[in-house]
Amino acid sequence: MPSCKLVALTRPLPGREADYHDWYQNVHLPELVNTFKMKGAQRYKLVAKLMGADENEFLAIYDIECDDPAALLGEMGQAAASGKMTQSDASDMGTTYTALFQEYAPRVVPA
């Protein structure tokens, strides 16, 4: 089964940081991982910019194995539209970036 990574770059709305972090870590990640049988997920905080002008300071990476990435995205969209996923009004949706990547080449490790 192909390995995929769903990545999400996000940031909280000003003044809503505590709500955003609580929702993301304690509601959103567990909902996605458990509802869509993901292998796991983890969040990261930006510590340095090297290139580009993206405004998001948080990254979430979801580990997924699936045969049909398009079907998975469709299921996720349906769950969001039907209210089966808990939304938050503390996340800045105007800057959010999400994308699904499928493994393309072997992992490079130290020799």
Image: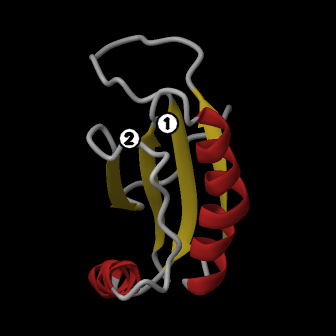
Color theme of the render = secondary structure
Position of 101 with respect to 106 (left or right) is: left
Report whether 101 appears left or right of 23.
left
Residue 75 place in picture, x, y as percent: 37, 87
Q: Label 1: which residue?
A: 12
Within-10-Å neighbours for mark 1: few <14, some 14–19, many 20+ = many
Q: Which mark is residue 92?
A: 2
**Residue at 32% in and 55% down:** 99
Q: Residue at x 61, y 53 (%)?
A: 24
Q: Which mark is residue 59?
A: none
Q: Is residue 47 shown above or below 59? A: above
Structural crowding at the residue carrying mark 2, measured as other residues with C-alpha within 10 Å and reported as few (<14), some (14–19) or many (≥20):
some
Q: Position of residue 48 (x, y in %)?
A: 53, 11
Q: Quadrant of residue 47?
A: top right
Q: Earlier in the sequence, mark 2 or mark 1?
A: 1
State the residue at coordinates (36%, 59%).
101
From the viewer's side, name the closer residue of 80 and 63. Answer: 80
Residue 52 sits above or below residue 75 on the image: above
